[in-house]
Amino acid sequence: MKITFTLNGQTASGEAAPAQSAVRFLRDVMGQKSVKEGCGIGECGACTVIVDGKAVNSCLMPAAQLEGRVVETTEGLEKDGQPHPLQTAFVKHNAIQCGYCSPGFLMNAKALLDHNPAPERDEVEKALAGNICRCTGYQQIVDAVLDASEVMRKGE
């Protein structure tokens, strides 16, 4: 089946198999390699993308449900050759180690900041609770999101 949707601000379309998950469609058909499949059951957050402004586990979503939707992946964070403030903050705070979970964290953090530009620490922790990282210990990730929030509010 042909699926047409907006991907990172551009109209996109591709052929999906009837039972294909959104994570497999986005990776295998649309070339969005940042969308990782970790657990396949919606528990680890590695596959997180933003659909119509909301962070979702793409491993649980059928590809067919992307039809007509607006989808954002980590590939769409960079603008005009410049990394998104979240990406910069993740590097600054050493919030990326092996990197497998990073795209999911970035997309959950972006969804949070899109709706709440000035979150408190507990709000960041709650928003990222569905993401698992085996390397960082989470403190650096939360610090990075709070730092990016401040930078974004100041317009830096």
Image (cartoon, rainbow, N blue to C red):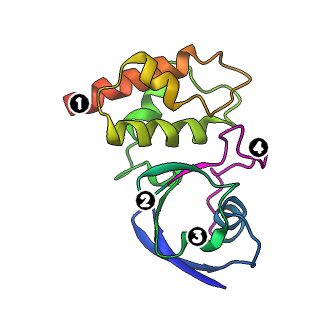
Upstream in sequence: badge 1 or badge 2: 2
Give residue 52's mark: 2
Give residue 153's mark: 1
Which span is picked out in magenta?
A: 30-50
Q: Position of residue 137 (x, y in %)?
A: 65, 15
Cα gap from disc 1 to disc 2, whole angstroms: 22 Å
Say which of 22 and 10 sits in front.
22
CB-based contact (under 8 Å), mark 4 and mark 1? no
The residue tagged 3 is 65
**Residue 33 visible, this orientation:** yes
Crowding near pointer 4: few (<14 within 10 Å), some, many (20+)? some
The residue tagged 4 is 38
Task: Report whether 28 appears left or right of 106.
Answer: right
Q: Indicate the amino acid at tag 4.
A: Gly
> At 66% from the left edge and 36% from the top edge, which residue is drawn?
101
Cα gap from disc 4 to disc 2, whole angstroms: 23 Å
Q: Where, by quadrant of the figure, is residue 99 drawn? A: top right
* Disc 2, SS: loop
- Residue 43: in magenta span: yes
Crowding near pointer 3: few (<14 within 10 Å), some, many (20+)? few
> At 37% from the left edge and 28% from the top edge, which residue is drawn?
148
Say which of 63 and 10 sits in front.
63
Upstream in sequence: badge 2 or badge 3: 2
Q: How many marks?
A: 4
> At 54% from the left edge and 17% from the top edge, which residue is drawn?
140
CB-based contact (under 8 Å), mark 3 and mark 1? no
